[in-house]
Image (spheres, rainbow, N blue to C red):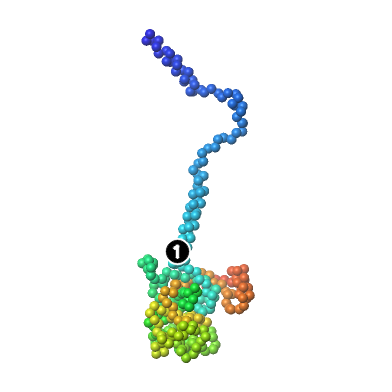
Amino acid sequence: MTDEAPQPAIEAQEPQTGVLSAPAPAPAAEVAQAPVDAPPPKAPVPRAETKPRAAALTSLQSLLATVVIAIFVITFLVQAFQIPSESMENTLLVGDYLLVDKAHFAEGGIWSAILPYATIHRGDIVVFHYPVDPRQHFVKRVIGLPGDHLRIVDKQVLVNGVPLHEAYTQYSARAHDGLRYRFPNLQSIDPSVEAAWWKELPQLVNRGELVVPRGEYFVLGDNRDRSLDSRYWGFVPRENIIGRPLLIYWSVEGLEGDGAAGDKLARFAYLVTHPLESARWKRTFRVVN
């Protein structure tokens, strides 16, 4: 009896093995109902298809970083300006486009511990907020420093009694101007002089010399006959100074002259349509000094 007991177990395992190795074919009715050209089932979306979204996010981050850097540069380091008048000829011409270094003369705040700010010297060209209307920007040359005694006699500037050598100046007016060629002049009144400055001026004159107060600067244009400068409206406070012109990155001619509004519009239209013909190539990328 012990020899015949395993036989039923062996016979029971054989049918199970056959079912697992060779499943029965589907019924004929089910095969006929399946479409011949049915599309295969959709595969799971691979992770590679999420790359465009990641790339767009990366581009947006790069754009935001660029904007932040640009704002930082414009606010603290460099800013573009255009010369609209002839007051600084021939150093700067009408139609010159400048990059102004705003970090050179900046002071105060957290940046004073990071950036190497410089002291303003006589002869430096500076860009500043016009004291009469701070919304406007002027560019002039520093002539008088705090504590200086200065006067102008027959076009010659004397600082602390010493004639100032100025190879950069030019004079274009034919008629003698009492204010331009003799300063301070308390005898004649010029309608171009600001009333507040004319009232303050006598208090700042000592023995015929103008004394520059602490924290103030006396500035003049290089084109002495065409410059609205400290002779007409007073000193530039230290906090008004933005920076110094760094270089001329572009320059075009054809913007000179006052003329009528129609003439200005015609000149502007010509410059827009003929940018290469009107460019002053020799002034492009010239360092300002």
Image coords of residue 175 (percent x, y): 54, 89
* Residue under numbered circle 1: 72
Check the image and name the residue furthest to the left.
113
Residue 242 figure quarter: bottom left
Amino acid beneath label 1:
Phe
Residue 48 place in picture, x, y as percent: 50, 44
Residue in the picture at 38% in, 10% down: 3
Answer above or below: position of 206 versus 97.
below
Image: 269 above or below 192: above
Picture coordinates of residue 39 (x, y %)?
Answer: 59, 35
Identify the residue at image location x=50%, y=47%: 51
Above or below 84: residue 161: below
Is there any visible trace of residue 289 in the rendered image? no
Residue occupying image coordinates x 54% and y 37%: 42
- Looking at the image, can residue 189 be seen? yes
Residue at the spot x=62%, y=73% of the render? Answer: 265
